Image (tube, grey):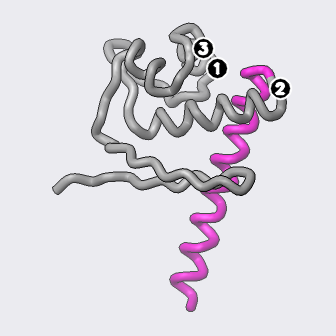
């Protein structure tokens, strides 16, 4: 059975759908092409821990979920004219809020 992640992106009145196969893996050059960014910028995402840490032997192996994370980082950097260290902090806060929302939803589901 194949698991496919469907993600809807809604921004300023536009709506865009994107299908990403979570099992896809990309090397650094292909990943940069898919995200529309330079390889140097991608390497900085790793340096600032914006993309999840990976084993040394797979340091340049990227997955479907990394695509949306890199694109989100780019939008934050562009929209807020933020440094990558600020983007890393924003991404951490977004992750924490999403995790807290899941926990709250889980608690409400089991108490209703």
Residue extent of the magenta highlight = 83-112
* Quadrant of the image containing the C terminus: bottom right
> For the residue carrying disc 3, how many other residues have a C-alpha within 10 Å: few (<14), some (14-19), or many (20+)?
some
Left or right: residue 39 versus residue 81 is left
Left or right: residue 78 versus residue 100 is right
> For the residue carrying disc 2, how many other residues have a C-alpha within 10 Å: few (<14), some (14-19), or many (20+)?
few
Q: What residue do we see at 38% from left, 13% from top?
A: 56
Above or below, 41 against 68 in this view is above
Q: Position of residue 83 (x, y in %)?
A: 79, 21
Comes first in the chain, label 2 or label 3:
3
Total marks placed: 3
Above or below, 101 against 36 in this view is below
Which one is nearer the viewer's eye here, 57 or 72?
72
The label on residue 48 is 1
Which one is nearer the viewer's eye here, 59 or 36?
36
Kindly indicate the quadrant of the structure image that contains residue 78.
top right
């Amino acid at each position: 059975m194949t698991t496919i992640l469907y993600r809807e992106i809604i921004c300023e009145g536009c709506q865009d759908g994107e299908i990403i196969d979570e099992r896809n893996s990309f090397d650094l050059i292909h990943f940069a092409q898919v995200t529309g960014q330079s390889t140097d910028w991608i390497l900085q995402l790793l340096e600032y821990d914006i993309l999840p840490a990976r084993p040394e032997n797979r340091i340049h192996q990227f997955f479907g979920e990394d695509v949306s994370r890199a694109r989100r980082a780019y939008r934050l950097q562009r929209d807020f004219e933020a440094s990558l260290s600020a983007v890393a902090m924003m991404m951490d806060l977004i992750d924490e809020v999403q995790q807290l929302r899941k926990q709250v939803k889980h608690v409400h589901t089991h108490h209703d």
